[in-house]
Image (cartoon, rainbow, N blue to C red):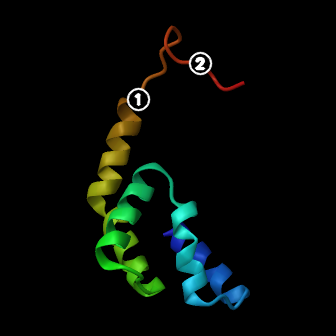
Amino acid sequence: MEFIRGIDMIKDDFELPERLVTARFNTLFTRSAHRWYMKLRQAHGHQSWNRWKTQIINKWANEAWRFKVEIAFESSKFNADKDKPLP
């Protein structure tokens, strides 16, 4: 998963301590990912980066999630009356 590979590279390149990496999740995640993170963080407290990697993979790198995203993409349609194109 690209997100995890990116975090691992930054962590290794800058020799960042694990706590510094996981502390950024509160501001890094947005919308549903932020809600998911906050729920797990409140329930389980501080977790290691390896534990978070496992949780992220279980939540977003599985076939059910990919299928859901594909269906949403395929069913999305541009409506000129309702939607505005990007500037």
Count of residue discs: 2
In the picture, the disc for residue 35 is none
Q: Which of marks 1 and 2 is in front?
A: 2
Q: Which amino acid does label 2 sit on?
A: Lys
| Separation of residues labelled 1 and 2 (CA atoms) | 14 Å
Q: Which residue is drawn at 44% across and 57% down?
A: 34
Q: Residue at x 61, y 90 (%)?
A: 17
**Percent of width and height locating residue 32:** 40, 51
Q: Label 2, secondary structure: give it.
A: loop
Q: Which residue is drawn at 41% across and 38% down?
A: 73
**Percent of width and height locating residue 56:** 39, 70
Q: Which amino acid does label 1 sit on?
A: Ser
Extreme left residue here?
A: 64
In the picture, the disc for residue 84 is 2
**Percent of width and height locating residue 76:** 41, 29
Foreground residue among 33 and 61: 33
Q: Which residue is drawn at 59% across and 76% down?
A: 7
Q: Label 1, secondary structure: give it.
A: loop
33 versus 13 height, above or below: above
Foreground residue among 2 and 84: 84
Q: In this view, does 15 lie to the left or right of 43?
A: right
**Percent of width and height locating residue 63:** 29, 60
In the picture, the disc for residue 76 is 1
First in residue order: circle 1 vs circle 2: 1
